[in-house]
Image: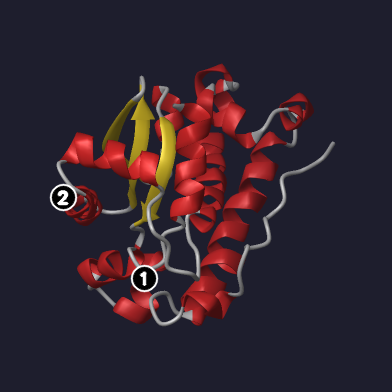
Amino acid sequence: MEEFQLPKLPYDYAELEPHFDEETMRTHHQKHHQAYTDKFNAALKDHPLLFQKTAEEIITNINEIPEEIRTAVKNNGGGFINHNFFWESLSPEQQEIPEELKKLLEETFGSIDEFKEKFSEAALTQFGSGWAWLVLNNGNLEIVKTSNQDSPLTEGKIPLLNIDVWEHSYYLKYKNRRPDYIKAFWNVVNWEKVSKRFLENK
């Protein structure tokens, strides 16, 4: 039985400075993400066949999970995959948006600035803990919000980009200033990764 493992980040904890600080990145990854990983494995331990699936397959088909563990799997499996996805959505190097994705963002939202404004507004207005996402839904781009560790995968939507708006993701540096954290986020988006996800699923 192969348990799920906390992934190594594709950059050092300090590499997203000054936008995301080293202490927050280290704590967020080593403490919060590790805890979701451990609790996800614990929830699945009596159902070893589930370890043969990917975490994404488990969450996508959450209603097929035995009822006695479903909530724990949804919360902790969601936390596991949402964070995996978030780390891969970030890059130390500022990137331009690849042309095909840029064109569709402009067609869908009016302009890149308008897209960023709408995405930021979703992140800002997510009440309590949760996430804002750019997703593909039947080939169309949409901005959605999810609470806690819910995932768009459970609604059949394909995630392309997300931002964590749980307070633990920004409180050490930005205190209660979620707008400043969201503004800083745009400096570290891995647009090459977002574009790759889009091209693989369009």
Q: Residue 5, relative to residue 151: is it above or below? A: below
In terms of secondary structure, where does tag 2 sit?
Answer: helix
Frontmost residue, 48 versus 202:
202
Q: Quadrant of residue 173?
A: bottom left
What amino acid is found at the position of numbered circle 2 in the picture? Glu
Q: How is the image coloured?
A: secondary structure
User: What residue is shown at x 40% (from left), y 33% (from top)?
Assistant: 152
- In the displayed orientation, state which residue is furthest to the right: 1
Q: Which is in the foreground here, disc 2 or disc 1?
A: 2
Q: Quadrant of the N terminus?
A: top right
In terms of secondary structure, where does tag 1 sit?
Answer: loop
Q: How many marks?
A: 2
What amino acid is found at the position of numbered circle 1 in the picture? Tyr
Q: Is residue 145 in view?
A: no
Q: Is residue 41 in view?
A: yes
Q: Residue 100, relative to residue 32: is it above or below? A: above
How packed mark 1 is, by other alpha carbons closer than 10 Å (few <14, some 14-19, many 20 or more), is many
Q: Residue 29, relative to residue 117: is it above or below? A: below
Name the spot of residue 82 as percent of width and height, x first.
49, 46
Seen in the image, is 85 located left or right of residue 137? right
* Residue 85 circle label: none
Q: Residue 153, relative to residue 103: is it above or below? A: above
Name the spot of residue 197 as percent of width and height, x first.
50, 39
Residue under label 2, please give it: 114
- In the displayed orientation, state which residue is furthest to the front: 99
User: What residue is shown at x 57% (from left), y 52% (from top)?
Assistant: 36
Residue under label 1, please give it: 170
Seen in the image, is 137 located left or right of residue 81? left
Frontmost residue, 41 versus 175:
175
Seen in the image, is 141 located left or right of residue 195? left
